[in-house]
Amino acid sequence: MTDTKNTSQRKTDVLIIGGGPAGIQASRMLKTEHPEWDVTVLRPESYSMVYCAIPYALEGLISADKTFKKDDLLTEVGVNLLRLKAVKVKAEDHTVDLADGSSISYSKLFICVGATPVRLPVPGADLPNVYTVKTGEDMIRLMGCLNGGQDFCVSDSPDKVPEGLKAVVVGAGAIGLEQATAFRTRGAEVHLVEMQDRPLPLMLDGEMCSEMITKEILETGIHFHVGVSLKEMVGEEGCEAVVLSDGTRIDLDPCKDFVVLAAGMKPETGFLDLDLFDHRPDGLVVDKHMRTNVPDVWAAGDCTSFYSGIDGKPLGGKLATNAVPMAKVAAQDMMGIEASYPGFFNGAVTVMGHLRIGGTGFTESFARSRGIEVFSTTAELPTRFPMMPEKGFIRVRLLFEVESLRLVGAQMVGTDAVAERIDLLTLAIQHRLTAHDLTQLSYSAQPWQTFFPAKNVIVEAATAAVNSRR
Ligand SMILES: Cc1cc2nc3c(=O)[nH]c(=O)nc-3n(C[C@H](O)[C@H](O)[C@H](O)COP(=O)(O)OP(=O)(O)OC[C@H]3O[C@@H](n4cnc5c(N)ncnc54)[C@H](O)[C@@H]3O)c2cc1C
């Protein structure tokens, strides 16, 4: 099929709605494997973004333009890129209406429209200096605030914020924590608000990790309001004060200070006729091949609802590291290649000050909420031979199912190699390994990169689990 551009009725073999990680991954695979197919990506914004890098642009560590992906990623393999928004899917006609009044027909449709940050249902959430962060526009707007409203160039690395600038960040998940750190590094007075009793509540729940991160947050000079929720944002033309559930009032200058809501994401599926698509609050329901219930329509990434690889029940998983492999499965299925997605394990990592932090699988509280009885063990070791310079440490907490000793979760705080260990433990969870299996982990050792050959932190924690059950 050919793309008859600039007419009111275009045709394409595969239409991909969304140019995020899922859309880019699938379109490149399809076009590379099937150069004869016409593959079209709809993406309304000027750039696809490296969202994970936004906090580092806000911090001034990299210039803002480094977060923009080049369109070559799509065009170099022959994918058609249309900078247009889909406004309606007419699945019966295999047609999608576009924002410019035209439409495009498809043989196969892949929906990967992502998710948008939630505007909390509290008074004042729509005030002009209350922001959410997802798009390039959001980033540029915030950079303007941090620059005191002065013009700046996206290729510049910005400086300190104007004296006395205040920012309130609501939500101490990874995105909120990384943004709070960025604003604080730029010199702002930062208030971080978290309704749970600890930072990173979806990633960690062991005291040994949480206390260490809380200490690091406080040491950076961030005011951490933990265990309290956002009650209201007061003001008419702009937010003049943030009021918390414990009565704390954080006064703001509505002309320069700002609030960022980082308290969850919701699927961007409003343009779809949801009577047609099976869906749950967190997105379109897809099967293990990423097929929706509608013929010839696949979906993947943040706009979908999938299930846990641990217990097979529905689970959120709005991470690029889920979106990309899901998109691979969708593309393979569209090409007739057998592929299925094993479920979410949600291995994720972040940074707070000097600490590298990670979690995978279930937390203890979440496992219990799903009816899995768990117990935990911990271990801590240096990450170099003790006689070496540049000492580091790693703390590991492993969660095992009581009955089977199967690993169902892991949490980690340390100075190095957290992401690699989290990935290793995700693989262990994926393959249903037990504490006994982990005591037999065959590991490596070298003075710069590990502790002595006599001990490995994962083996230590697993051995503690086996010993505790003797
Ligand atoms: C600040 C920030 C930091 C993050 N850090 C990490 C991290 O460190 N690690 C990690 O794994 N994940 C991280 N994430 C999450 C990650 O970015 C998402 O999980 C990932 O982008 C999801 O990919 P996606 O392709 O499903 O959707 P998206 O990336 O959201 O892409 C959706 C695309 O669809 C387009 N679209 C939407 N509606 C329409 C429409 N009607 N018509 C046409 N196009 C449409 C959008 O414009 C966009 O291009 C972060 C997210 C944010 C916001």
Image: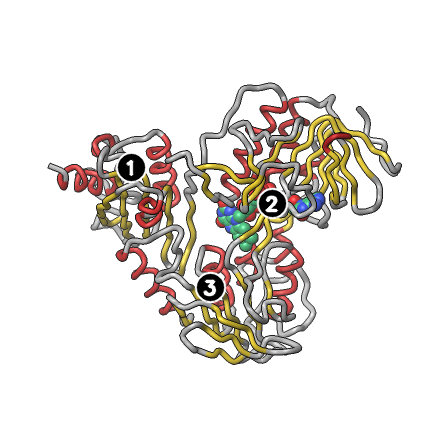
Q: Report whether residue 52 is seen.
A: no
Q: How far from the left and from the top, in percent, is residue 146?
A: 59, 70
- Mark in front: 3 vs 2: 2
Q: How far from the left and from the top, in percent, is residue 328?
A: 56, 30
Q: Which mark is residue 267?
A: none
Does the numbered disc 1 mark a residue whose Cβ is under 8 Å from ligand 1? no
In the displayed image of the protein, which residue is found farthest to the left?
470
Report the quarter where the N terminus lies: top right
Local secondary structure at mark 3: helix
Q: Which residue is mark 3?
A: 181
Q: Report whether residue 131 is seen.
A: yes
Q: Which mark is residue 114?
A: 2
Compared across the picture, whether 179 is left or right of 41 comes to: left
- Count of numbered tags: 3
Q: Which residue is mark 1?
A: 407
Q: What residue type is disc 1 on?
A: Leu
Mark 2 burial class by Cα count in 10 Å: few <14, some 14-19, many 20+: many
Q: CA distance from mark 1 to mark 3?
A: 32 Å
Does the numbered disc 2 mark a residue whose Cβ is under 8 Å from ligand 1? yes
Residue at the spot 32% in from the left edge and 52% down from the top edge: 413
- Mark in front: 1 vs 3: 1
Q: Between residue 118 and residue 164, name the one nearer to us.
A: 118
Q: Earlier in the sequence, mark 3 or mark 2?
A: 2
Q: Quadrant of residue 309?
A: top left
Q: CA distance from mark 3 to mark 2?
A: 25 Å
Local secondary structure at mark 2: loop
Mark 3 burial class by Cα count in 10 Å: few <14, some 14-19, many 20+: many
Compared across the picture, whether 237 is left or right of 354 comes to: right
Residue at the spot 60% in from the left edge and 45% down from the top edge: 114
Compared across the picture, whether 46 is left or right of 454 comes to: right
Does the numbered disc 3 mark a residue whose Cβ is under 8 Å from ligand 1? no
